[in-house]
Image: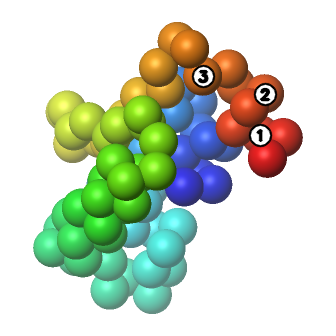
Amino acid sequence: MEIFLQAEGHTLSTSLISGTLWPNGSGSQERIHTLIRRLRKSLGELTALQIKFKNDSYHLIIPHFIGKNALTNA
């Protein structure tokens, strides 16, 4: 979640996720998709945040009613 909040436009490519979380190269597409599925489930239970997939990248959607400061000052 932290790397989504720090990323420009809250967008992460699958290669960036893989390289960040599995620098040894073991971050397969299946592992990435499993990680995102679990993160989506947790977010759905707790917040209005969403993660969308497009063009081989994941994008964190922050609704307009949630200010950026609310996310970074928690």
Q: Is residue 32 visible?
A: no
Residue 59: % across, % down:
37, 35
Q: Quadrant of residue 53?
A: top left
Q: Amino acid at mark 2?
A: Asn
Q: Nearer the viewer, residue 52 or 30?
A: 52
Q: Residue at x 22, y 71 (%)?
A: 34
Q: Are marks 2 and 1 in contact (CB under 8 Å)?
A: yes
Amino acid type at circle 1 is: Thr
Q: Which mark is residue 72?
A: 1
Residue receiving disc 2: 69
Question: How dense is the environment of label 1, judged by Cα within 10 Å: few (below 14), some, or many (20 and up)?
Answer: few
**Amino acid type of the residue that numbered disc 3 sits on in the rendered structure:** Ile
Residue at the (37%, 53%) spot, across then down: 45
* Residue under the image location 35 percent in, 37 percent down: 50
Question: In this orientation, does residue 42 appear?
Answer: yes
Q: Position of residue 52 (x, y in %)?
A: 26, 36
